[in-house]
Image (tube, rainbow, N blue to C red):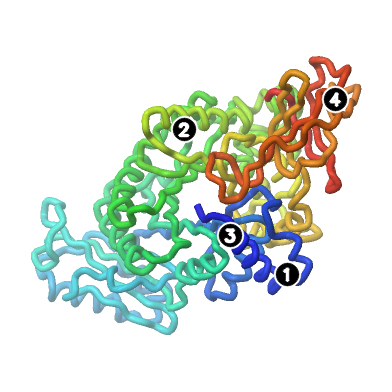
């Protein structure tokens, strides 16, 4: 984790002033928005990366995450017609001709293409007699060979009987290198997307086990290249595993096997770097994929045993697989925006879902704590989905999902509670940068309201009311049973605050604030919210 410091906020402030103007000077600092990491697409210039990261930094982000490209099966004929190979069709024919000269007894078994906005180094090439790179404008193409003997064991290329070819198309405008450089200047940390296992042709949610020997050898080269090119980068803190799987007691065995095999390579090539995964969960009762909190608990343990460092479960509100409701709201109708979700429709939360977001993150925390007792250390983060289900005004060319609102993001933060150690969000591009029918981009709304109060938990301790959340200090606490409303008298104020850079398992900026329990408030007074000069928080339920 990159430690925050006075220098960090000075760097952020100067960069913000350059990008956003003098108004941004009040936005950088420990009182930022609780979400501190985002997924980003690649970019073709350092200026583009600088602009995106600087604005994200202004909201409080210190982490950038990227997906890894996926090799795609193809054939030589199709490859010739695809960009960028169509610009130089002789490349494919020459690859076949040269292979026959180097490995005369070899048969080409499979062909893969791999697109990356990167400029790999010499570490990608292992067979000097055959493998090489060719530049076409700003594009670089690497042709790689993965030889096997007749029984399918790896062999030397000249005596190979079977060869799989991988054609990598990269760029002289290395997006990953530029990301690391700009993130380093802002003292941000980056999880680079490592290669993603090919999809099974029949069961696309599974990694393709048959081709894993070739994929793992290819991934090993890429990881070795990262070690060589980025080993000295302080911003490069780890890799992101892009293969997704459900959090469940009975989960995808092929994905777990892929995790284990690929993570061994990370430990060998990138010692000290962390491995992050972001699985998803589904609480819908009317879908066969729906699971209970107990199943989530066991699923987290399965994933943790594949040698990961960070598990950041998707809260699944963007897809509507889980609802943002309190236990006492189980009989309430689901939000209108969830009516379009398969297996939900117009019903109540209790009829639609096995459990709410809070219970799932609680189960995940229980699993992580039980692993700690066994000597297995895993950090639990929360990936809050920054989009909404349904079709409407597009928010970028890559999706038909809708952008969400800050109000709903605040509620997602509230429902995750104190269980995750860090809050990240899928994704910055372009859910936070598009307008899509709203007055302004979501990022601008967050910048304007970054310090509005968010309560995530409430507890009564004797005659004290202790609230946990963000930007609560100095506020007024309101306690209600739905009819009467009572104002809690001021207490001792801030009991504790999680400062940026402090070690621990709570998100930066989380604070515990104390009020006196209001006289006359009975057991039914469980609905609590806080008002500060920046507005009202949403309502939290005491004890949930």
Q: Residue under circle 1?
A: 20
Residue extending furthest toward the bottom: 137
Left or right: residue 105 compared with residue 286: left
Q: Residue under circle 4?
A: 480
Picture quarter containing residue 439?
bottom right
Residue lying at 44% horizontally and 60% vertically, measured from the top left: 236
**Tag 4–tag 2 contact (CB < 8 Å):** no
Element on which disc 1 rests? helix
Residue lying at 36% horizontally and 53% vertically, measured from the top left: 272
**Tag 4–tag 3 contact (CB < 8 Å):** no
State how far apart marks 1 and 3 are (Cα). 27 Å
Q: Residue under circle 2?
A: 368
Which of the two labelled residues, at mark 1 and mark 2, occupies the earlier sequence position?
1
Q: Residue under circle 3?
A: 398
Residue extending furthest toward the front: 492
Q: Is residue 340 visible?
A: no
State how far apart marks 2 and 3 are (Cα). 34 Å
């Amino acid at each position: 984790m990159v430690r925050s410091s006075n220098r960090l906020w000075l760097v952020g402030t100067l960069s913000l002033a350059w990008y956003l103007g003098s108004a941004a000077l009040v936005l950088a600092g420990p009182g930022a928005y609780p979400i501190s990491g985002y997924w980003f697409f690649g970019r073709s210039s350092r200026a583009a990366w600088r602009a995106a990261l600087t604005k994200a930094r202004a909201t409080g982000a210190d982490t950038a995450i990227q997906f890894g490209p996926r090799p795609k099966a193809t054939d030589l004929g199709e490859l010739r017609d695809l960009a960028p190979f169509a610009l130089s069709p002789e490349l494919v024919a020459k690859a076949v001709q040269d292979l026959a000269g180097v490995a005369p007894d070899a048969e080409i078994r499979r062909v893969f293409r791999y697109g990356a906005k990167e400029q790999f180094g010499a570490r990608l090439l292992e067979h000097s007699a055959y493998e090489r790179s060719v530049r076409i404008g700003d594009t670089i193409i690497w042709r790689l060979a993965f030889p096997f003997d007749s029984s399918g064991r790896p062999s030397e290329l000249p005596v190979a009987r079977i060869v799989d070819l991988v054609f990598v198309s990269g760029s002289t405008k290395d997006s990953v290198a530029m990301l690391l450089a700009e993130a380093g200047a802002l003292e941000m940390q980056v999880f680079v997307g490592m290669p993603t296992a090919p999809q099974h042709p029949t069961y696309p949610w599974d990694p393709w086990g048959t081709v894993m020997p070739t994929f793992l050898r290819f991934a090993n080269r890429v990881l070795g290249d990262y070690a060589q090119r980025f080993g000295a980068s302080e911003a490069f803190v780890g890799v992101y595993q892009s293969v997704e799987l459900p959090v469940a007691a009975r989960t995808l065995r092929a994905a777990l096997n892929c995790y284990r095999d690929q993570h061994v390579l990370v430990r060998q090539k990138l010692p000290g770097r962390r491995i992050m995964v972001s699985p998803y969960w589904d609480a819908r009762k009317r879908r066969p994929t729906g699971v209970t909190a107990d199943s989530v608990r066991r699923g987290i343990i399965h994933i943790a045993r594949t040698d990961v460092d960070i598990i950041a479960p998707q809260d699944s509100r963007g897809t509507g697989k889980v609802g943002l409701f309190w236990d006492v709201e189980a009989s309430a109708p689901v939000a209108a925006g969830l009516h379009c979700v398969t297996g939900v429709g117009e019903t109540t939360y209790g009829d639609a879902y096995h459990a709410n977001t809070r219970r799932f993150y609680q189960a995940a925390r229980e699993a992580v704590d039980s692993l700690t007792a066994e000597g297995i250390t895993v950090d639990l983060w929360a990936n809050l989905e920054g989009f909404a289900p349904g079709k409407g005004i597009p928010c970028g060319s890559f999706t038909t999902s809708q952008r969400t609102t800050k109000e709903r993001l605040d509620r997602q933060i509230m429902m995750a509670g104190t269980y995750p150690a860090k809050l990240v969000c899928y994704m910055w591009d372009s859910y936070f940068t598009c307008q899509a029918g709203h007055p302004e981009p979501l990022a601008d709304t967050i910048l304007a309201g970054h310090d509005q109060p968010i309560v995530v938990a409430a507890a009564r301790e004797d005659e004290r009311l202790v609230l946990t959340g963000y930007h609560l200090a100095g506020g007024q606490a309101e306690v209600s049973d739905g009819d009467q409303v009572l104002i809690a008298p001021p207490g001792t104020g801030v009991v504790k605050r999680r400062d940026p850079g402090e070690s621990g398992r709570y998100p930066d900026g989380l604070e515990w604030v104390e009020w006196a329990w209001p006289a006359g408030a009975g057991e039914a007074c469980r609905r609590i919210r806080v008002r500060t000069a920046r507005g009202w928080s949403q309502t939290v339920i005491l004890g949930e």
